[in-house]
Amino acid sequence: MWPAYAPRQSLDSPIERNIFSFIFKHSKRDQFILLLVTLTLFPMLYLTLELPKRIINDAIAAQTDVVEFYGMSFTQIHFLLILCGLFLLSVIVHGLMKMRINTMKGVLAERMLRRYRYGLIARILRFPQPYFERTSQGELVSMVTSESEPMGGLMGDALAQPVLQAGQMLTILGFLFAQSVTFGIAACALIPLQAWLIPKLQRRINLLNKKRVVQVRALAAEIGESASGAATLRVNGGWRYRMAMITDRLGRLYEIRFDIYQKKFFMKFLNNFITQLTPFFFFSIGGYLVIQGQVSLGALVAALAAYKDLSSPWKELLDYYNQAQDMQLRWETIAERFAPNGMIDEDKFYGQPDSLPRLDGDVVLDGVTVRDADGNAVLEDITATLPAGHSIAITAPSDEDRRALAQVLTRETMPTSGRIHIGDHALNDLHQGVIAARIGHATSRPVMFQGTFGDNIMMALKHQPHGEGKDAAFAAESLRAGNSDDMLDAPWLDHGRAGAEDDDALLDWWLALVGGMGSSPTLFRRATEQRIDAATHPDLAQRLVDLRPKVAAALEQDDLARHAYMFSEDAYNPALPVAENLLFATARQPVTPAFIAGQTEFLRLLTELGLDRDLLALTRDVIDLLRQIFGIDGTDHPLFRKLTLDAETYEAAVTILSRQREGTALTPADTALLLTVPFQITSDQIGAGFPDEIKDRVLEMRGLHAPALQASMGAAFAPIRAGEIVAGLTVLENALFGKISNGAGSKGDEVRAKVAEVMQDSGMGRDVMRLILDVPIALGGANLPAFYAEPAAVSRAAIKRPDVLILESALASFDASTQEAMFENLRRLLPDTTLIFIASGFDNTDAFDMQLELVDGRIVGGTAAQTSTEDSATSADLARKVQALGSTDLFSGVSRKQLRLLAFGARWYSCPAGDYVFYKNDPPADGAYMILEGEADLWLPRAGQDKQLITTVGPGALVGELGLIRNEPRALDMQAKTELTCLRIGVEEFLAVVENDATTAFKLLQVVAGYVST
């Protein structure tokens, strides 16, 4: 039986090669129900064809004034009206049935598309990690969103559309043959009505389509994150919560599309109804005129000759055939891209494992070999035993080696050969849920997901919901569409996995982790920059208010108070924007022209009090001042970027004021934009050039009108009051009850440190640190610097108390002492965990129980030294060159593939002591020389004088590279001081690496900078 959250299609087997197989496998019942409803159209269609004939023959062309019909007598006029009424009723019923059928097709299409997309995204989370390195995320996103979009139409039309169109054709043909007549051209009397009404309805549909586009873009962003962070989700057990997010997003899309279908097919119903009104009027009014003798019956029949057109259903059938062929081709293309080799088995990914065994045994690697997509060995015959509960340091100079070893230990990469066991458990046989619970992994390149800091930290504890969502109908529809029934609003946090009983205990455990990494001060500083809501954190808010006198006294004592602007109702605060000084309140949200335009009560009050002229004059003065300083196009200047004034707002304000000076009146939009400027600019940012007259005018207006202006803004602004928390300020600013001067420089950092110290000494550190969990994270963690992201990654991996913790270049942005303290503290905090540290080097290996060295994909030191005797002479020589190049600082970061290309083109070069390798002004065609053994002198020949020794170079030095880059003759003589062994690197090979490897290019730039400095 399928787990509740697993996709209903078998994703482990290949995707169905035929789109119709997928359609009928998952919607056979719905397709046949839709077919049965469609069949009910044909009697109604025939009735709409038969009634006109009856109207003409039995009513209009009746030979007597009294018509007998099934034993009942009617006058000719009454019978005509009855038949016309029946015709109109049949048209309405036929139209309503078509509307219903089209809505059913739309809902079925969207439900199937939702199932298909969910299945594709679920497959992405099972892709092997190397596949993402050679597959564009944009390509995956495009296939799941835009390329799959047209398939929905075919999924709804698969059976009903051809049956409907073919049935219409047969019905019309049967009627034509039975009657032996042809229809004429339909009248166009109501086309103007359609031209006026239908566009109005279409505009409403367009608005819904805009909402749909917004949701599709958001879905594409979440898919991109899931693709780049699939490994993080698997290792930390966050895939189920992630799929609940996907379910929620797809559900919102479904609801919008359902509204679109309802409005779209109602519009079509109206359009068809209006079209059918034309023959109704012809039959009723025209028939009456024929009876009265004013129009001939032949003229009426001729006007209706083409009322029914046989070409429409035929055209629809052709379109259906073309669409089916196009969608089948699209389906095959997507199926091919979503079925890579090495996917995690479905039965090891979905559902919950039967048990969560402890992985507290030795980690044993037995002949593990990993090859890349080209068949080259990345890890080769790795055999080692990592003792349980020990700290193991693995030195790997190559980033590729480090990444490959970490991925194979977390099963992100499957070994080409060999096995990995942890205790009695084979890693390849474990359920992904076991790996997520028992193995932690962090890297210096962590993937962060959009949400909050806390969402990312607690990912490992959100592996399954622990209750039901609030919307049962939404969950039921999700299941019907083959999506997860894990609702996003269900309780997800599992405190027990972290060994905690509640939120407070969990917070204490996380604080212990970040404290052990030495990241508490950094994260605390970031937490103090958070805005605080008194309603959410009432106790902390009150404590901050009570702390203000103590903060002020501490700053006065250390002579730091002059570097901050304290709030006072009687003083202008240079660190507040001009308009906030006027209101004496801070904005709860960014102030934009659109925001100002929406504050109708505020704008009305400004006009009523005559303050709009003052504020516009103030804006004019500020913009004129900035224009004198920066000009019209100086927004790229670093000093302008320090201002809080938006560049687009500034440029637009300059243009508007220029037009006003030429006599153009301000529009409401112009006024709103100009009034935005005082809400963004501060006098502290401008400096001494900000006129005192403006400050005086603002204070004067504040004293007279601030309360009324605050009231007109409603909840958009938070008043600044000494005895209350100010919602628009950060934690630090609330404790300070002021803002730090823009020009304080390093003294500003001292002010921040002093305020933080007072908060810590007052016992508020824990409550303030809780706020860091609410820090919003942008898409892909773009707004999170490395010194925040790296500790977050380590704590995310460690918070679940794993049995095995793998840290790959963890805290690489921190100094060696911080890293060493982390090693020791993690050992203390996780005493039973097997800690595996993988890095390019360690300053103090005594801190570890075991040390290994990984070079060129092989263990070369420690207890698992090994060599290979199977290499041929050619491959052995290539391996020697690769090892020699990779051991140098310049090429240590180059990928294994690039190193092989470089080594393949390199040649061994030996030179006896005293011989010259090259002379000044020689062409650089022989390449650059990488010294592996010996030393060489670089001489500068001088005409008529002794040559000058510039420098002596030794192993690891690259000589002659500048001549290759600049394509210029040699600048110096190179003479072997001792016997030299070098690798001579060809021009093309060297330039290819420099052009394609940013790390090498940067290191080469550092070397060149060293030449300049010396």
Image: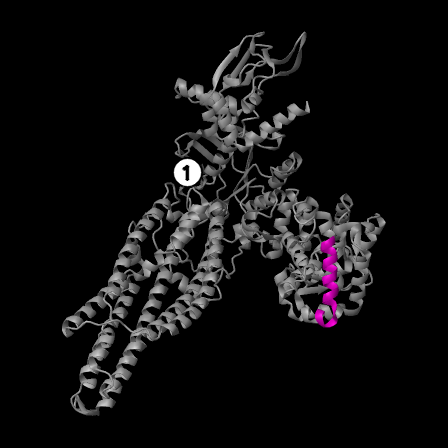
At which x and y percent is residue 668?
Answer: 63, 66
Q: Is residue 609 magenta?
A: yes
The reply, left or right, for residue 293 in relation to residue 405 is left
Q: Is residue 166 above or below residue 780?
A: below
> In the rendered picture of this protein, how many numbered marks are placed on residues?
1
The reply, left or right, for residue 179 in relation to residue 469 is left
- The coloring applied to the image is one colour
User: For the point 56% across and 48% down, which residue is it?
Assistant: 781
Specify the amino acid type for callout 1: Met
Residue 331 or residue 402, whichever sits in front: 331
Residue 939 or residue 353, whichever sits in front: 939
Segment tinted magenta in the rendering:
606-624
Disc 1: which residue: 414
Q: Quadrant of the N terminus?
A: bottom left
The reply, left or right, for residue 28 in relation to residue 861 is left
Residue 119 or residue 815, whichever sits in front: 119
Q: Quadrant of the C terminus?
A: top right
Q: Secondary structure at mark 1?
A: loop
At which x and y percent is residue 397?
Answer: 54, 29
User: For the point 56% across and 7% down, which residue is it?
Assistant: 915
Q: Is residue 855 visible?
A: no
Q: Residues within 10 Å of mark 1 (few under 14, many from 20)?
A: many
Q: Is residue 107 magenta?
A: no
